Image (cartoon, coloured by chain):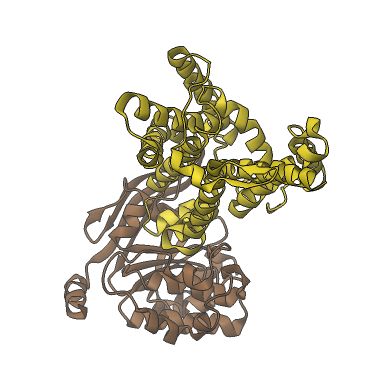
Amino acid sequence: MAEAMTAPRMAAAGTAMLEIRGLEAWYGESHVLHGVGLDIRQGEVVTLLGRNGAGKTSTLRAIMGLVGRRSGSIRFEGKELIAARPDLIARAGIAYCPEERGIFASLDVTENLLLPPVIAPGGLSLDEIYTLFPNLKERARSQGTKLSGGEQQMLAIARILRTGARLLLLDEPSEGLAPVIVQQIGAMIREIKQRGFTVLLVEQNFRFAQTVADRHYVMEHGKVVDMVANEDLAASMDRLHDYLGV
Amino acid sequence: MLEDLLFNLQLVALGISNGAFYAMLSLGLAVIFGMLNVINFAHGAQFMMGAFVAWLLLTQLGIGYWPSLLLSPLIVGLVGVAMERLMIARLYKLDHLYGLLLTFGCALVIEGLFRNIFGSSGQRYSAPREFQALDLEFGDFFMPGYRVWVLIAGTTICIATWLVIEKTKVGSYLRAAVERPQLVQAFGINVPLMMTLTYGAGVALAALAGVLAAPVYSVHPAMGANFIITVFAVVVIGGMGSILGAIVTGFLLGFVQGVTDVVYSEASQTVVFVIMAIVLLTRPAGLFGRA
């Protein structure tokens, strides 16, 4: 099975796995995305940077089909998803971890972990998850929302690693967590990259972003306005400071 | 003295067996409200349809009680699925007051249709004779075997439903979708289909209670309307959307009605609403609800 999974991954390397063009999105009457364009290649970790309200979260939600209305083009592994329902987008191989983590209070830790259905082979096994996140095994029977913030974040990411999704959308996994936990999350993202997952990461904290990402897109007013490769980050600091106001 | 006690005990036992109907009906309402955010006012009409379908199966096709316990909920459940797809699903984006109004309208239409076709007088539907074997009788205490069966069946159905919701994979989808339907759908689960099936299951539960009720009350178009008012009081007391609350409160209020029947029988129909008023004033989210 591992063979079967790696072959197409190798073949696709270099070409875009996710290709977004002219993405517009609305929540009711409010127009939140104004023509977002970006590409993510197989195996990359790419961040969306930008100030509050720039449209980072909306971009992830629009990719998942969780906005009121959207137009443009979202091609994933060659398949157009702009008109698809969220469950079919998930089944195409994209998994989403929302900013508020979305841990279910009425489910225990194990039920939370096993909730997202497996959509393709190639995800982590339960044993691998427990090796990566030993806390989740210890607290298997606890109510999901009784975990600490860091543990909830781990759980929110762990449950989408099982499903066989190939592209993970992570919305600010470092938000509100203690520095030592943020480091753990960073290590975990590098680990999942190593395992061949592709990640689109929303971040406000670019110090954290630069420890995990290959490239950074900068968003402003519902558009992607710039792209910086991680190795050019130091040279582009002034520009980034202007964008992010830090 | 002993005769009095036994007679009183009988009233209480009958009350608890009425509680089984309250519990089954409020359970269906709670499941539907939790998942769809719709207060299903058609629940009484669907309960009545369950009883009528059993009666029709018997009088038109000669199909007896036991097969009807399965067939009638299936048929009425499918009617529920059609109602959800064709009508209720169009209102999810609106305030849930609209769902209430729509299902209330449906209830009136359904009851009107049945009254037109079958008239308002009751139809007899007799329980199979074998239930007499369950008759409980000591002196002045008498509980018909069929009432004993209702109590056993109702309790079993409630426990089974609770176990499905709390202990199975499907139940975990349901609980999760109650909390965050969008996220559950973004995990690859077809939430709109789940909502349709949940409505169908809640309606089937009402119909099953209707079949169980057919031999107890005569089968007539208003039988659901009479019941559903008390059942809504039960739901309010238990806490809207709480599964366990619906079950426990259903049985509890049946018991309270029975006791009231003993102490001051004139109040036995009103006591539920007095309790409802007290609960609303002191614990608006209900006994088991989360504020």
Q: Position of residue B17 (x, y in %)?
A: 61, 44
Residue A221 visible to the viewer: no
- Colour yellow maps to chain: B
Image-quadrant location for residue A52: bottom right
Q: How many marks?
A: 0
- Colour brown maps to chain: A
Q: Is residue B224 above or below residue A204?
A: above
Image-quadrant location for residue A205: bottom right
Name the residue at 39% across, 34% down.
B85
Q: Nearer the viewer, residue A35 or B109?
A: B109
Q: Nearer the viewer, residue A242 or A119?
A: A119
Residue B37 visible to the viewer: yes
Q: Position of residue A63 (x, y in %)?
A: 38, 55
Name the residue at 51% across, 61% down.
B166
Q: Is residue B260 above or below residue B134?
A: above
- Relative horizontal placement of residue B285, taking residue A193 as reference (left or right): right
Q: Position of residue A55 (x, y in %)?
A: 49, 55
Q: Position of residue A137 (x, y in %)?
A: 49, 82
Q: Is residue A214 above or below residue A90?
A: below
- Relative horizontal placement of residue A111, taking residue B14 as reference (left or right): left
Image-quadrant location for residue A167: bottom left
